Image (tube, rainbow, N blue to C red):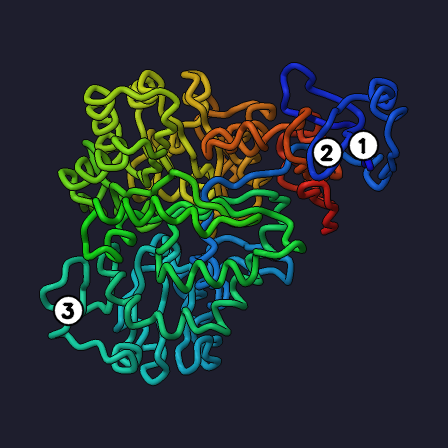
Amino acid sequence: MIEIFKAKSVITVNPSLPRTEVIAVRDGRIIETGSLESLKPWLKNNEFTIHDDFEESIIVPGLIDPHLHPSMAAVLLPTYFITAMEWKFPWGLTKATTTPDSYDKALLEACSTPTHKDLFITWGHHELWHGPISRDRINALDSHTPIIVWNRSFHELCMNDAALEYLEIKEDDVKNSSQIDFVRGRFFETGLSFALQKLNPYILDQEIFTEGLRKLKEVVHFGGHTTIADMAVGLFDFENELNAQKLIYENENNPFRVELVAHATAMAGLSGGDHVKGEQLISSLNTHNSDHLRFDKRVKLFTDGAFFAQVAQLMEPGYIDGHEGEWLTIPEQFENIARIYWNKGYSIHVHVTGDLGLELAIDTLEKLQFEKPRFNHRFTLEHFGLSTPEQVHRLSKLGANVSANAYYVHELSNLYANHSVGYERASSMSRIGTCFRERVITSLHSDFTMAPAHPLTSMWVAVNRINEKGELMSPEERITPQQGLEAITINAARVLGLDHEIGSIRSGKKADFTVLSEDPLEVDPTAIKDINIEATVFEGRIFKI
């Protein structure tokens, strides 16, 4: 049986046939797109049915987020959100909290209701809006309730005395640990791992974590996705993460697939700290593959620290206040680890946020290309906070890809211009326009919860570059709506090595579509984020929103 999907217009993201009217699908695959007239050879020889649910709507390829963290989302969604930006969810709205006083008031009002057994965990604190956080500040609000304030970056958290006591963390336990400030109750970057060991029994509690994954399922569908990538499997606990995702997502009623990318350091940790053995473990993970969850030959590496937490590694002139960033992987170690995976033929995805972290990744790629040349290697720079035009040019010549978090521009550019890196660098963060001009394959992602899991919002930011104050930042780095749509469809598929299967609407590809109320290429570009997502079609099955 052939199923025909009719629309007001089908935007195919296929330059050979950019607009059509109908799509013919059989057994979850597209057999042809065009018009009812052009499909006659198929229709006269086969039984068919016509779906006219979307004849007044716009169909685009299924939206793709190539960098999202289901496990991180499952940990954070059950926490209490106190954030500087408004957050819209399928189940409700979190209003913005933008000053230290309003933050303290919100925390004090909420903390009497624990989120994780006896613990109260809140997420979303950012120093530039909410003021510096410390155990003393939290103690002054409530010294009896165990309170954990998780930073907006996710890469750090802060505890009050009651939480430290409840989790049995003593100063002697951490006095020789790096990136832990016990006096302030602060655990950041690699120091976060120590805190997570204590928190895992609570945040990975089966009931709480499973409910978090169910909430993420709603969020992903609400955003119009048909494919997401879990860009760091093993972030908390590999076995628990994978088993929970199998439980929630491996069923015919799940409207999206999850591409699984292993966290190299976590896999090495499961292999006695040996990255060679870690690679061997990763190479065996495809035995877990199923219809909705799949490992391929991809791996996630890290250079510098978090962008939201202002610990990205920067070249001169650095930060305005003179503080320095942090390395997640020591440069010499990064090169050695990357070489293991490069020589084994992996697609390497590298977390980079500052221009110095980016420089390390580019230098490493250049050296590896010299040692062992590869083509279509899909070495991808993830996040891409601060960069230089010269670095983008080098990326182009080396055949690298970029998966950018455009949302940085909206939420952070005004604050960072005035308090962090100055106007010139803040205005050109997420240098996406240059990437397109240099013909670097560039996609957009949310890194959820670093940005809303809503690809049209990412597209809106990249096309308009309007920050939260309403200012236009570096108009030269804007991209066109067509490029923006490509960045959340075909380019995202290319970054994941899946462009032969998904990312555009053409004969032979999987029947993944997103149904929109308006045309994202014809509306006022400032209205792109407000387009209603009506439904998705995943491998030929309709899922209404």
Query: In the rendering, which numbered label is found on residue 7?
Result: 1
| 543 to 213, vertically: above or below | above
- What is the three-letter code of the residue carrying label 1? Ala
**How far apart are the alpha carbons under marks 2 and 1?**
6 Å
Q: Position of residue 385 (x, y in %)?
A: 36, 36
| 407 to 428, vertically: above or below | below
- What is the three-letter code of the residue carrying label 3? Val
Q: Using a 10 Å C-alpha cutoff, classify the residue at mark 2 as few (fewer than 14 neighbours), some (14 to 19) or many (20 or more).
A: many
Q: Secondary structure at mark 1?
A: strand
Residue at image mark 2: 59
Q: In this orientation, which residue lies closer to the viewer: 308 or 273?
A: 273
Q: Using a 10 Å C-alpha cutoff, classify the residue at mark 3 as few (fewer than 14 neighbours), some (14 to 19) or many (20 or more).
A: some
Q: Position of residue 140 (x, y in %)?
A: 31, 77
* Residue at 47% in and 55% down: 70
- What is the three-letter code of the residue carrying label 2? Ile
Q: Secondary structure at mark 3?
A: helix
Total marks shown come to: 3
| 46 to 224, vertically: above or below | above
Q: Is residue 514 left or right of residue 414?
A: right
**Are dots 2 and 1 in contact, CB under 8 Å?**
yes
* Residue at 24% in and 69% down: 185
Query: In the rendering, which numbered label is found on residue 483?
Result: none
Q: Mark 2 vs mark 3: give the one in front.
A: 2
